[in-house]
Image (cartoon, coloured by chain):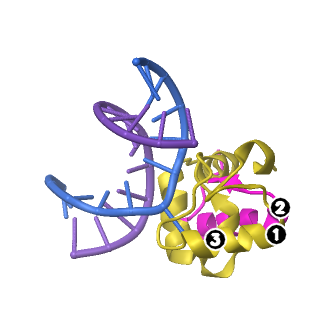
Chain colours: A yellow, B blue, C purple
Amino acid sequence: MARVTPQEYVEEVLSLVERIPAGKVMSYGAIADALSEVSGRNSARQVGTIMARHGGGVPWHRVVNSSGRMPPGHEQEARQRLLSEGVPLKGDHVNMSLAHWIP
DNA sequence: TCATTGACCTGTG
DNA sequence: TCACAGGCCAATG
């Protein structure tokens, strides 16, 4: 399998997040699984850590956990951004059944 | 090198 | 979907 350097893995994560179309969202586990084919590693926790450290240049609000919840400390901001993009929200969390996107 | 931490996931009830 | 428990893996001190 194609192992990549941590820095390239970060680039791959950011690229995939940028590829998420408006109105759709992706879970950390789905990102980890999708990138596992090019990175060799698949850990949702690692994706979350990368987003927390390097997610300042991508639509991170399109990345949620399996329950459709948003990262702590940015719930309101993410909810407002998703609402503006037409993402089906269910109260304060995303309706995964409609917004879940697979590349 | 070891121990702790963290924007998580999967079962089970 | 919610609550609880166990696990996974890399970054950080």
**Residue C6 shown left or right of residue A77 in the figure:** left
User: At 58% across and 46% down in the image, what residue appears?
Assistant: A67
Q: Earlier in the sequence, mark 3 or mark 1?
A: 3
The image position of residue A102, as x and y in percent, is 79, 47
CB atoms of marks 1 and 2 within 8 Å: yes
Q: Is residue A15 magenta?
A: yes
User: At 72% across and 65% down in the image, what residue appears?
Assistant: A17
Q: Amino acid at mark 2?
A: Gly
Q: Secondary structure at mark 1?
A: helix
Q: Amino acid at mark 1?
A: Glu
The residue labelled by disc 2 is: A23
Magenta-colored span: A1-27
Q: Secondary structure at mark 3?
A: helix
Question: Between A12 and A88, which is closer to the camera in this rendering?
Answer: A88
Q: Earlier in the sequence, mark 2 or mark 3?
A: 2
The residue labelled by disc 1 is: A85
